[in-house]
Image: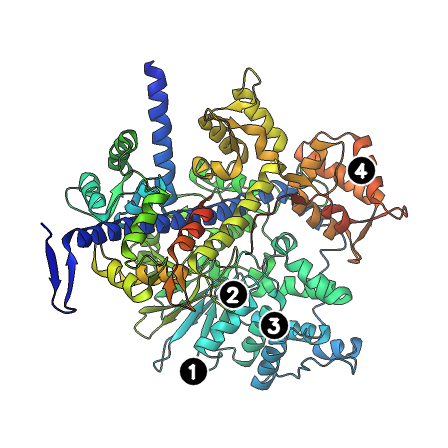
Amino acid sequence: MCVFIVDYTTSMCTPLLSVLTAIRAAILIQNWYRFTKARLETRRRYSLSIFQSIEYADEQDQLQVCNFHFFLYKHPGVSQVVDEGLSLTEFENKIDVPDSYYGPRLSFPLTVEDANALLHAFRNEQLLHARYVLQLLCETRRVLKEMPNITHLSTSYSKEITVCGDLHGNLDDLLLIFYKNGLPSEQNPYVFNGDFVDRGKNSMEILIILFAFLLIYPNDLHLNRGNHEDYIMNLRYGFTKEVSKKYKDHGKLILCLLRDVFSWLPLATIIDSKVLILHGGISDTTDLDFLNALERNELKERIPTTRLSKHIANQNVAGKTQHISSSGSTEPSGSNLPPDHALEEWKQILDILWSDPRSQNGCTPNKSRGGGCYFGPDVTAKLFERYNLKMLIRSHEFKPEGYEISHDGKVITIFSASNYYEEGSNRGAYIKLNPELIPRFVQYQVSKYTRRQNLQERVGTIESSALKSLREKIYAHRSELTSAFAQYDLNSTGRISVSDWAAAMESVLQLELPWRMLRAQLVQMTPNGEADYMSCFYDLKIGQPTKEPALVETLCRYRRDLEIIFNIIDKDHSGLISLEEFGQTWKLFASHLGIDMYDESLDKLVLSIDYNKDGHIDFNEFLEAFHVVHRLEKKANS
Amino acid sequence: MASRKDGAVAEIEKKIIEAFEVFDHECNKTVDVREIGSIVRSLGCFPTEAELHELLAKVEEEEPTGYINLEKFLPVMTKVLLDRSYQPIPEDVLLHAFEALDENKCGYITKEELIKYLTEEGEPFTEEEMEDMLSTALDPETNTVRYRDYISMMIVDET
C-alpha cells in the first residue's frame, strides 16, 4: 500500500516515504552544516589565541632586555632633549620646502581647511613635509603643556561624546570612523584613548591628524596617553622604523620632539565626574589625586620592571616606603637608582597604562604583560566608591568584536583597530556616550577586498597567518624543543606520544594553546598514533644556510631586539654600523642574556655578511638573513 | 592493563579540557551555554540539535545560569567520546542526503528549494544559517547549489 500526503497549497501528492526521506536528508545536511560552522569557529578562536599569546610572549621577552635597552638609551645619540626654545619660525628658517612638494602646506594657527587638506593628502598616500611635521609637533607640545594630567569634560548641550580605543597606525580605521561619525568639531567631541602608533603603517599620519584637530579644537579633541606612546616601545614595534624611513634625515629630530610630546599627553579623562577613561586599567593602589599632581613629562619611558618590583617589595615590608640611597648602585655606570618617589610615580603610571581587567577578584601582577596588574571586580568597585564613579572605559586589549563589557557593566574595553592581527581577524568599534552617560557601540571592519570574503575565506586567512607565526616561534626554539622531546624519547625512536609532545611544546614555548587541536597542523603522525617529533621542523629553514645552528637560532629569536639595538647605535640612521660596533654590542647583549657565544663563529658569520668588505654591515640585510622562510607556503591568500 | 586504559581516558580528558578552554574567555572554567554545541563538535562529534539539548540537560546547573562548568561537562563529555556517540557523517551519506532533495537528479538544487527544505524541515535553519550556507554554496550565475562541488570544497578545506 502506498500512503500519499496531499499538500493543499501546491496540490502536489508526495509519497510518505519520500517526505520522510526529505526530512531525514534535511536533518543530515543541517547537522553537517552546523558541524562545519563549529569547526570554523574553533579554528577562528584558536588562531586569535595564537596571535594573542605570541604577542604577549613577545612583550614578555621585552622585559628581559628592558634593562639592556635602558642602559643603551643613555647612549649619547638618543637622550638628547630637543631645545625647548625651538619655535615655528626657527623651523621655517632652517628647513626648506621645495617647490616640487605638492603636499599640504600648513599655516599656523591651523584651520579646518588645513585638516581637510591633510585628510585628503593622506588618503592619497602623500607625506606631510618634515618642516610642517616639526612645526605641528612644536605647537602640539605647547598646547599639551597647558593641560592637566587628568582632563575633566562634561556632556552639556546634549552633545554625545565619542570615545575611540587603540588605532595602532591603522589609518583606514580612523578615516572610516570620521566617515561614519563625522569629523571632530565643537558639536562632535572625541576622546582618543591611547596607542595611536606602532604595528600599523600609518602611525605618523594618525598622529598628524589627531594633533591637527587638537590644535583646531583643543576643547573638543582629547587624547590620553597609551603604553605605546613610549620611545622604547616604538623602537620595537615599528613606529621608529616608520619615521626613519619616511623622514630620513629629519627623522631623528622628529622622534626626539615626539618623545617630548608623548610625555606631555594627558594620562586620563573624566566625563561628568562619573566616567573615567584611561588606556590600560587600574590597580588596588591607584590614586587619582596623586596621578593628577605628578610631573607627567618627567616620565618618558617605562623603566625596567625589576627595579619596580624591588620598590613594591620594599613598600610591602613594614608597610611603608624605605629610603633607597640614590647613589652607589650596581647598575652600569651612567644610571643612578631613581629616588623612591619617582618609583612610586612610575608604578602609578604603569598601572594605568598596562593593567587588564579579569573576572577573578583581587589585584595580581600582570604576568603576560610584564607590567601593571590584573584587576578584579572588587578593585573596580573600591575605586568607584572612593571617587564616586560610574564607569571605567579603557582600551589596551584586542577584542574580536571591537568592544567588551566586564565587571558587571562597570568596565568597558574599546578597541578601534580592525583587522589587528590579520585581514578579517576582528572588528573595531567606538562608543557614543550620551548626556545620560549611556554608551552606544558602533562596530566596523575595514576590508582590502572589494568583495567581502565569506567566513570560510576569512578564517582560512587568519589561520594561515597565525600558524605561520607559530611555526616561526617553533623554529626559533628548535634546540630547546629537540632536547625536550628527546627527554621523552628514551630509546631514541624519533617518536613520542601526543601527550608528551604537547607537554614539551607547552613547557618550552610557554604558550597556553590547544596543542592537541593544533597537532595536525604542526607535526606528522606515525601509523600507530605517535608524534614524529622532528617533523615539526620540516618545511622551515633560515634564509641563509649556515653551519652554526645554535647561533642562528639565537639570532632568530632575538632578531627584533637586535633590530632595536642596532637602530639605537646607528646614530645617523644610515642603516650601517661598523663591524667593531656590531661585535661589541653583540658581546654585551649576549653576556647580558647569559648566552654562550664563541667569538670565532660570530666573526665568521659577520664577515660573510659584510658583502663589500668595507668594514660595515648593513644590518637590515644581516637581520633579513635570520628571517625564517617557510618552504611550503600554504594557500594563504587564495 | 588498567594503567593503559587510564592513560587513554586521561588523554581524552585533556582533549576535552583543551577544547573547553578555547571557548573559555575569562579563563575561569566556565563557558556560555550557547557555545556547548561548538565545543562538542570541535571534538569531532556530530550531534543533532535534539541530542545537544539532551546533553545540555545533563550538564546544566539546577537553576540554569547561562554558563556551563567544566566540572560538570568533563565527565559527561568523556563518556560521549568513550561511547563514540554522535558519529560523524561520512561523505557518501551526505551526498545521498543532497541527492534525496534533488528530485530530478540533475546534480543541483535550486536556491528556493534548498531554502524551503532547510528552513522548514528537519531541525530548521535560522535565517542567518541559511544565508551563510548560501554565501558559500550558491552559484550566483545559475542561482543553484551544485552540491557535489560544494561538498568537495568543504571537505578539502578541512585537511
- Where residue A404 sits, quadrant-wise, is bottom left
- Mark nearer the viewer, 4 or 2: 4
Instruction: Please tell me which of labels 1 and 3 falls first in the chain.
Output: 1
Q: Which residue is mark 1?
A: A187
Q: CA distance from mark 2 to mark 1?
A: 22 Å
Q: Residue furthest front?
A: A1
Name the residue that disc number 2 marks.
A266
Per the model, the C-alpha gap separating discs 1 and 3 is 21 Å
* Local SS, label 1: loop
> Is tag 2's residue or tag 1's residue first in the polypeptide sequence?
1
Q: Relative to residue A572, is residue A611 depicted above or below? A: above
Q: Are marks 1 and 4 on the same chain?
A: yes
- In this view, the residue farthest toward the right is A614
Amino acid type at circle 2 is Pro
For marks 2 and 3, the one nearer the N-term is 3
Which chain does the residue under circle 3 lie in?
A
Residue to which mark 4 is pinned:
A605
Please give the residue where the numbered disc 3 appears in the rendered image. Answer: A208
Left or right of A70 on screen, residue A528:
left
- In the rendered view, how is the structure colored? rainbow
Residue A378 placed where, x, y %?
A: 31, 49
Q: Secondary structure at mark 3?
A: helix
Marks 1 and 3 on same chain = yes
Let me know if residue A632 appears in the view: yes
Q: Earlier in the sequence, mark 1 or mark 4?
A: 1
Which residue in the rendered view is the most extreme toward the top? B1
Q: Chain of mark 2?
A: A
Q: Where in the figure is residue A150, as x and y percent of width and height?
A: 47, 65
Locate the C terminus of chain A by quadrant: bottom right
Residue drawn at 79 percent across, 32 percent down: A601
Q: Residue at x 57, y 48 (%)?
A: A634
Q: CA distance from mark 3 to mark 4?
A: 42 Å
